[in-house]
Amino acid sequence: MSQKIEVTVGPKRADFVGGDHLILQSAVDYVTKLGGGTVRILPGRYEMGNSLFLRDKLHLLGSGEETILRKCPSASTPLIDDTDWYDTTVHVKDPSIFRVGGGLLLRSKCPFYANRMLNIKLTVTGIEGNVIHIDRDPREDLWPEAGAEAVTLFPVVTGNYVNDITIENLTIDGNRTENEHLDGNYSGAIFMQDCDRVVIRNVTTCSNNGDGISWQVCDDVTIENCRSLNNADLGLHPGSGSQRPIIRNNTVLGCGIGLYFCWGIKNGLAEGNVIEDSKQYGLSIGHRDTDNVVRDNVIRRSGINGLQFRDHKVARRNAHRNLFEGNLIEDSGTKGDCVAIELQGVTEDVILRKNRVQDTRRRSRSRHRVGLRVGEKARRLCLEGNTFEGLEEDIVYLRGK
């Protein structure tokens, strides 16, 4: 359509005036009720007491670094009565930490299966004494004796079962020092669940106590010219079942793992990214991640391996038919066997072509620098035109050549 609605949000002189998640949500809901359009967020710092929930056919456009969405500090309180799967209320010890319209995460060990953790994201719709009303029934059983508690944790920006979304030109601050941890299967500075045709461009996600950007079971997601900085877990997380992701020209600095191909990522492209100072791995790929292209990336100073192929014992569950071409992998590992590329598992038909693996550090008795270590079960590995510099060993075959 040649014409679609556009509104502004800002602390003053805007169509929607305010500085928190409520005013942002009002603008998003208004635009999308009219068939979709643009919400332009003016410069300012917006305090996020709940997720900004995205809707179909939305263009969320900030004003660059001057638009900051900042997660409010988290707080937690134990449940003092059962919340069963059909309930729409939660009885808590301290209701003062909640606000109507705010985010509420119910978490607990499952009372029936001790090794299963429950994490249910909800919104507060009312407060009466110690009773918190929530927007839907949790469809799980959360009981005090299993350690159930209510926490003000949530993604800062989230999309659930919505399509055709663009997010551009803003900063999302996860306020890591004042928030508890919530992993990337449930959250991130940006978290998408079952969404298609999403573009995230020129967005900074920083200091989140979890992932920077996580998208789960989402097809045709493009992450371009973004920055993921000092997030506790995964900088960029194409999550389980996500098809055809394009991850291009991003910068990932100081995250737990830079780029993590989760489970069943297929026909993806990771190109021109800079991944530095990851606490563990620069790039990790594994369970049924097949037919992807990873080229012209720079991966420096990873805490363990620059590029890790995860080990799965069953052949069909490994990372097959992936091409790695023209990448620079530099100064991997900190002590012991410092391996730039660790190819584990029953991995088949991987191509490593024209990559540069180098170590610029001085020799050290605490480091044994290896360019490529090939697991004993890898099959039909193709090596073409790779170069190795500054290492004790260029290529190690664990089963022998």
Image: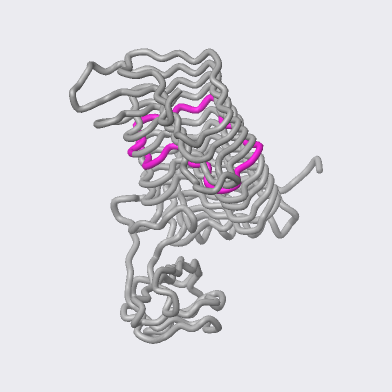
Nearer the observer, 354 or 216? 354
Could you tell me how many numbered marks the image carries?
0
Q: Nearer the viewer, residue 222 or 362?
A: 362
Above or below residue 350? Residue 76 is below
- Magenta-colored stretch includes residue 382: no
Judged by its main secondary structure, the magenta piece is loop
* Left or right of 197 in this view: 182: left
Name the residue rendered at 50%, 49% in the picture.
190
> Can residue 225 be seen in the rendering of this structure?
yes
Q: Quadrant of the N terminus?
A: top right
On whether residue 262 falls in the magenta region, the answer is yes
Q: Name the colouring of the figure.
A: one colour
Residue most extreme to the front: 400
Residue 95 seen by the camera: no
Q: Position of residue 359 (x, y in %)?
A: 33, 18
Relative image position of residue 261 (x, y in whole percent) = 52, 42
Which residue ends up furthest to the right in the rendered image? 1
- Above or below, 263 relative to 136: above
**Residue 267 located left or right of residue 317:** right
Q: Which residue lies at the image location 55% right of the left edge and 74% below the top edge?
A: 135
Task: Write down the region rendered in magenta.
Answer: 254-279
Q: Residue visible at 52% across and 34% down?
A: 378
Q: From the viewer's side, name the closer residue of 71 and 27.
A: 71
Counting from the top left corner in percent of width and height, residue 86 is at 55, 83
List x then y, in percent, for residue 237. 50, 44
Front-lying residue, 36 or 360: 360
Asked if residue 340 is positioned above or below residue 112 in the image, the reply reads above
Q: Quadrant of the C terminus?
A: top left
